[in-house]
Every structure is written in structure tokens, then in C-alpha cells.
Image: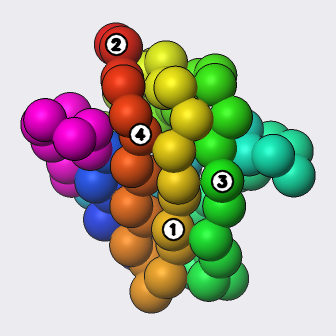
Amino acid sequence: MALNVELVSPTQRVWSGEASFVSARTIDGDLGILPGHTPLFGVLVDGAVTITGVDGGTTDFKVSGGFLSVSNNRVSILSESIDS
């Protein structure tokens, strides 16, 4: 089982694909998301988002605020700006 992840800014889709793990920092603290995670909606703070692909490769991004949504093994991350 894998997560279907989309990381987008207002101008582009920065990362899209299947992942085994996603971590991000919200106003409520750090989150680690694995397949089967309960649904949630979070407000991101400026900081790192890390996506571990199903192949084991890890990609780090720096986001400037935004939102994160998790539902049915789908993770949507929207941020005003994203640097890799």
C-alpha cells in the first residue's frame, strides 16, 4: 500500500507520485504520514516537507506555509512557494 502524493504551488505541480512516507510541520507540530493514516487537515508553517518515494528515495522541499490534507491514502500539500 502506498500514498498518492501531490505537492503543488500556485504556478506548478512540484512533486506527484506514490510515496511510502511524508513528513511535514504544522501549527500543531510535526506530522509523519504513512499509508492508512487517519484523515486530517493541517495548516503548514514555514519549514521542510520530506517525501519518501516507494523506491526508498527521499526528497526534501522547503515550503512557505500552506495546507496539508490526508484522506484515503491521498496526501495533498498546497503551499504559496516551494523550493527544492
Percent of width and height locating residue 13:
15, 41
**In contact (CB < 8 Å): disc 4 and disc 1:** no
Residue 44 visible? The answer is: yes
Distance from label 4 to label 2 (Cα)?
Answer: 13 Å
Q: Picture quarter containing residue 14?
A: top left
The amino acid sitting under disc 2 is Ser
Q: Nearer the viewer, residue 35 or 83?
A: 83
What's the mark number on residue 84?
A: 2
Verify whether residue 15 appears in magenta: yes
Q: Position of residue 35 (x, y in %)?
A: 53, 70
Q: How packed is label 3: few (under 14 Cα within 10 Å), some, or many (20 or more)?
A: some
Tell me which numbered mark, 4 or 3, is placed earlier along the sequence.
3
Three-letter code, disc 3: Val
Q: Which residues are magenta?
A: 8-17
| Residue 38 against residue 16 in the figure, above or below | below
* Spatial CA span between label 1 and label 3: 9 Å
Q: Please identify the residue farthest to the top as the structure is shown.
A: 84
Rendered view: 19 above or below 72: above
Q: Secondary structure at mark 4?
A: loop
**Dot 1 corresponds to which residue?**
69
Label 3 near label 1: C-beta < 8 Å? no
Q: Amino acid at mark 4?
A: Ser
What's the amino acid at mark 1? Ser
The disc, 1 or 3, on the residue closer to the chain's N-terminal end is: 3
Residue at 39% from the left image edge and 73% from the top image edge: 74
Q: Is residue 19 placed above or below 55 in the rendered structure?
A: below
Quadrant containing the C terminus is top left
Asked if marks 1 and 2 touch (Cβ < 8 Å), the reply is no
Distance from the alpha carbon under mark 1 to that under mark 2: 20 Å
Could you tell me which secondary element the residue under label 1 belongs to?
A: strand
